[in-house]
Image (cartoon, rainbow, N blue to C red):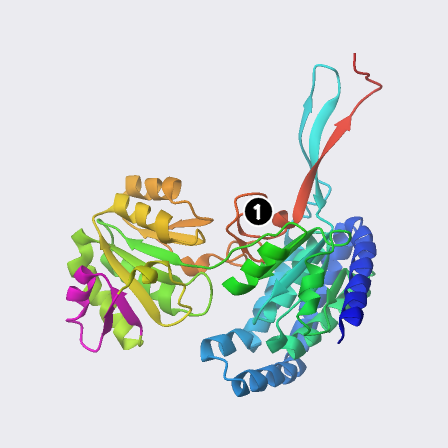
Amino acid sequence: MNATSTSELMNTLGSQAKAASALMAKAGAATKLKALRELARLLRASVEPLQVENAKDLVRARAAGLAEPMVDRLKLTPKVLETCAEGCEQLAAMPDIIGEIMGMKQQPSGIRVGQMRVPIGVFGMIYESRPNVTIEAASLSIKSGNACILRGGSEAIDSNRALAALVQQALVAAGLPADAVQLVPTTDRAAVGQLIAMPQYVDVIIPRGGKGLIERISAEAKVPVIKHLDGNCHTYVDDPCDIAMAVTVADNAKTQKYSPCNATESLLVARGVAAEFLPKIGAVYAAKGVEMRGCPEAMAILAAVPGATVAAATEQDWSEEYLAPIVSVKLVAGVDEAIAHINRYSSHHTDAILTTDHVHAQRFLREVDSASVMVNASTRFADGFEYGLGAEIGISTDKFHARGPVGVEGLTSLKYVVLGEGEIRT
């Protein structure tokens, strides 16, 4: 596709989205609920045809030599599709917050002032790999009364087209405009450059993918961006803690799935529990083929674990998002050093403390500067579906507007409303 036709295509998508956003903003709760339930039904009824389209992407990805964890992100298994359908139903069951008025207060002048929750308008979503993001973005867009333009990765183009077609089918069945959710049909990279530079049509851009993609979009976008660059998540094993629980949680946080941004990449262990904890988690990781990159103290303990793959950690390892069966391991004096290390090296995504000390837990919650902070739970829970948001559009490590998993609320804005009875300013 040449530059002129790409530009024309994106302008068409933009103007259609803008027109659709006005209709979505005034759609009633029952209409949006109908669209979401229909989308859930279509997903369950279309598992086989969706897998046929998904198989085309998987074949291409393997032929191109894509690493297996990345291929794993592309898969539309029946379980993945069921989770998408459940997410649509969870969103449908949630209260409709659009039009909600809050904080209404009478002023000395007589006027009453409050805020109303309204849709953002049009958001552009740029994402890589996971085609289920198409459904998460579309369902959240419907629930929040927005329109969206979706640009998935070229590696998932057939899966995304098939999913987007189901979304438009559900919209039309509910009496909503099909253009409320549009997929950029081309894999031409110039389309991304266009999408992030159309403030006349697009109100916010949400990139979801590798660090390179997000850095590029943040640098070049002419509209606001909700972003997170990477997911270097930490689990800190405190002194005191329940050792058996700590082993179970640290195992799940690292090995339940290696490719997501909420998998633990760095394990911090208090010296007071290291001699008991490290051999146990080391044996678990060794059995699962996880390479451990440790500080000298951690290496000395882990080297004695049968079958363990242990290497010396470099300075870079403390900041690394592996997305692979690798974990960095560091011994720390206690909660103070753990918090300082996390605030220096973490990507401010998700960090957890495993402890039986209430004071340590409260300090960790207050002082760790991350979008999600956890006590005695796996970092793998940092996800919109698991948080009860129905789905997530992404995870924001920004501090303005939206932070952490971005659900319906993160796709809305507040405007002031003033109610009077003829008051004039004197």
Percent position of residue 29, x then y? 74, 51
Circle 1 packing at 10 Å, graded few (<14), some (14-19), many (20+), is some
Q: Secondary structure at mark 1?
A: loop
Compared across the picture, whether 24 is left or right of 155 comes to right
Q: Is residue 308 magenta?
A: yes
**Res 323 visible:** yes
Count of marks overlaid on the render: 1
Q: Is residue 281 above or below residue 228?
A: below
Q: Is residue 180 magenta?
A: no
Q: Quadrant of residue 206?
A: bottom right
Percent position of residue 281, x then y? 25, 66
Q: Is residue 41 above or below residue 401?
A: below
The residue closer to the viewer here, 330 or 78, is 330
Percent position of residue 259, x then y? 45, 69
Residue drawn at (26%, 46%) of the image: 337
Compared across the picture, whether 222 is left or right of 339 comes to right
Quarter placement of the C terminus: top right
Residue drawn at (55%, 77%) of the image: 75
Q: Is residue 265 above or below residue 396?
A: below
Q: Quadrant of residue 268?
A: bottom left
Q: Residue furthest top?
A: 426
Q: Which residue is mark 1?
A: 402
Amino acid at the residue labelled 1: Ala
Q: Which residues are magenta?
A: 290-312
**Res 249 visible:** no
Q: Is residue 133 above or below residue 54?
A: above
Percent position of residue 293, x then y? 27, 67
Compared across the picture, whether 295 is left or right of 7 comes to left
